Each structure stands twice: as C-alpha cells, then as structure tokens.
C-alpha cells in the first residue's frame, strides 16, 4: 500500500539542481494528499520562471511511477508572480503614503481601507491602494474585479504593471496573480519579496494618497512597508471590544517605536454600534460602547471616526460596490466623514512634523 511516508521518502531522490537540496528538505512540497491509487501535491518554487520547474515535476512523476506504475499522480506547480525588478524611484510622485493597520483580524480593516480610498477619490484626490495582505487578499472582491488581471507594458527590457482602476482608485493586489480559491502558503521572505515587487514595479504616476492595506497584527510585512516606503502616517482600525483593543496598543507601540517612528494619525472605531437601516437613529452597542474612543483619550491619539454596523455594508462589500457611494447608508455617511478627518490629520502632520524617511533596521 502506498503511504505518505513512502511518497515522501521516494521524493527525497528529487533534487533542485540549483540549490542541490532535495525537494523534501527544501520544503517544496505543499498539500500532499494520498488516497487509494492516487497522490496529489503542490510543487512550490521560490522564484518566478524557475528554469528547472518542468524537469523537477517530470522527475518527481518518474520516481513515483517506480513505486506503482498505475499510480494516478496530480502535481500542481506554484511560482510567485514574475515581478523581478525595481523601477527607479517608483514612488517619487506620491505625496502621502498611509498605512491602514489593525491589531487583529476581523475588525473590518480592509472594508475601511476600500471605502476610504473611494471616498478620497470621490473628493477629487488622486488615490492608489495596495492590498498588502498577501496571505488573504480581499480588495479585488470588494471592488468586484477578481477576474481581472493588470495590463503590463514594456520599457526597454522591463515589464511594468498598470494598476487596475475602479471608482477612481488605482489598485494592485497579489490577488490579481493567484486564483481566488488558492491558499497562499508562503514563508515570510516569499511574502515580503512579492509585496516589494508589487509596490516598486507598479506605475503609480502622480498620487495625492497611496493607501496600504496591511495584514492584521505586526510582522514581516509591516517592517517591509516601512523599509520600502516613507510612510506619512498610520491609522489603526479596531472594534470596541477589549480583546481587540489590547492588540491596538501593540500596533501603536510598533509604529511609535524608536526603530520605526512612523506617526500614528489616529484610531478608527469600526462596528461602533449596530443601526438598523429602517431605524437610523437607533444605536445598539453590541461590541461594547466607545472602547476605541476611551483608548484614544488615554493614549492622547485622535479618534478619526466611528463607523456603525448596518446590513448594507456587508452586502456592499460582497457585491463590489463600496458603501461610501450610497448617500442613504449610515455607514457610508460615517465613512465620508472619516475621509475628511483623515485628510485634516494628514495636513496637520505634514505641517507640524518633518517628512518621514524610510526605516533602516540593522538589528
């Protein structure tokens, strides 16, 4: 009987000619499944257009056929996007780079980022949005552009990404380069490499604001962003719950730390209360009342906005039409007000503080 252990042992005979590691020790095998008469797995490469991908796949099939000539073998191949170069100063014409962060997942950070980008564009600003949540990109769905792929253009021997534009926002996301149903199982260096290439390879042109929708928490992606870009400031999204607020404090500490020192423009309280669409004056504090507001007061940080929960905001996100476009939506109105407050906070920051520099982390 063919078992996983037998499969893994057989695949140790397959080596990558460049690294000279076998594909098991090199951690190139993902999602291995073995059933009666069938084996399937993903063969994962760390760089785009690996010249050995086809030969390694063929060799792997060969060693498995030696175990059982009748074995049904399905091997998929994953390589990161072919974004292999860095343009000269690609962010030079961007006035403000704003990081949208959250201490934990599930607080509506991406929903806020998408609606904020659209609200700024609606006000006449030139806006870009980077979906930096490389493990779970959701921005393409929220704009209803999951099936689109950015156009590429040549400049000499270089390929340049043309961001997809919708509602006046220029958008790039790792989600454009992978299938929506595929899980991205990347180690830190792979994820940050893909993100750096997306940012530095895209043709942004002149922008007033580039928003960067970060993954939840603090980690490699956050450090990559502050090292690759001069972040004007960060805003942190949270719900009023105590469990969420504890992680907000960690996020504030990260941005304000000596090694990073990125200004925190303020906090955003999302899901601040529930408001039925048919009773817009009613407020039900289902996640607690004004937890983010109290934390902002304690830490002497601006509260930039309080966004209510309404049924429409979820439906709008799923349908790809941001709530901020609906003038009758209470959440949409709050999001428009949030955009005004963030613009004012950015203006104050630029007036009172020196421009942010890229972070150099040596330890």
Image: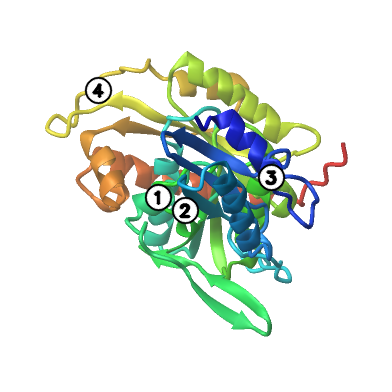
The percent coordinates of residue 234 (x first, y second) are: 60, 41
The percent coordinates of residue 69 (x first, y second) are: 50, 48
Which mark is nearer the camera, 4 or 3?
3
Q: Which mark is residue 175?
A: 2
The percent coordinates of residue 127 (x first, y second) are: 49, 61
> Which residue is depicted at the point 39% across and 46% down?
181
Badge 4 crowding class, 10 Å Cα cut-off, few under 14, some 14 to 19, many 20 or more, is some
Please state, as top left, top right, bottom left or bottom right, where the C terminus lies in the image: top right
Mark 1 lies on residue: 180
Say what secondary structure mark 3 lies in: loop
> Which residue is depicted at the point 71% across and 45% down?
13
Foreground pick, 238 / 306: 238
Which of marks 1 and 3 precedes in the sequence? 3
Q: Residue furthest bottom?
A: 156
CB under 8 Å between discs 4 and 1: no
Real-space Cα separation, disc 2 to disc 4, in angstroms? 36 Å
Mark 3 lies on residue: 23
Mark 4 lies on residue: 283
Say what secondary structure mark 4 lies in: loop
Which mark is nearer the camera, 2 or 1?
1
CB under 8 Å between discs 2 and 1: yes
Q: Which mark is residue 286?
A: none
């Amino acid at each position: 009987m063919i078992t996983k252990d037998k499969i893994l042992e057989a695949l140790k005979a397959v080596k990558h000619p460049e690294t000279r590691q076998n594909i098991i020790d090199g951690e190139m095998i993902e999602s291995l499944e073995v059933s009666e008469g069938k084996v399937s797995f993903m063969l994962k490469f760390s760089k785009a257009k690996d010249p050995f991908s086809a030969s390694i796949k063929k060799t792997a099939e060969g060693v498995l056929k030696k175990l059982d000539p009748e074995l049904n073998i399905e091997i998929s191949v994953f390589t990161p996007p072919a974004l292999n170069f860095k343009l000269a100063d690609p962010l030079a014409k961007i006035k403000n780079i704003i990081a949208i962060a959250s201490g934990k997942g599930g607080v509506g950070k991406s929903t806020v980022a998408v609606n904020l980008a659209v609200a700024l564009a609606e006000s006449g600003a030139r806006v870009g949005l980077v979906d930096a949540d490389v493990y779970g990109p959701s921005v393409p769905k929220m704009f209803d552009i999951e099936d689109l792929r950015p156009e590429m253009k040549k400049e000499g021997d270089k390929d340049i990404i043309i961001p997809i534009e919708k509602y006046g926002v220029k958008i790039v996301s790792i989600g454009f380069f992978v299938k929506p149903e595929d899980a991205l199982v990347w180690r830190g260096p792979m994820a940050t490499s893909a993100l750096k290439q997306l940012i530095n390879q895209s043709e942004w042109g002149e922008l007033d604001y580039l928003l960067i929708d970060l993954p939840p928490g603090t980690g490699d992606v956050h450090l990559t962003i502050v090292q690759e870009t001069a972040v004007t400031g960060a805003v942190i999204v949270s719900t009023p719950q105590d469990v969420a607020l504890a992680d907000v404090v960690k996020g504030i500490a990260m941005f304000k730390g000596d090694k990073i020192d990125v200004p925190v423009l303020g906090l955003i309280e999302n899901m601040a209360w529930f408001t039925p669409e048919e009773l817009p004056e009613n407020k039900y504090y289902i996640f607690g009342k004004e937890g983010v507001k109290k934390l902002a007061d304690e830490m002497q940080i601006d509260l930039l906005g309080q966004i209510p929960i309404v049924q429409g905001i979820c439906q709008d996100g799923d349908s790809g039409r941001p709530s901020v476009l609906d003038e009758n939506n209470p959440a949409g109105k709050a999001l428009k007000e949030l955009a005004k407050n963030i613009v004012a906070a950015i203006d104050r920051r630029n007036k009172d503080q020196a421009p942010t520099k890229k972070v150099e982390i040596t330890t």
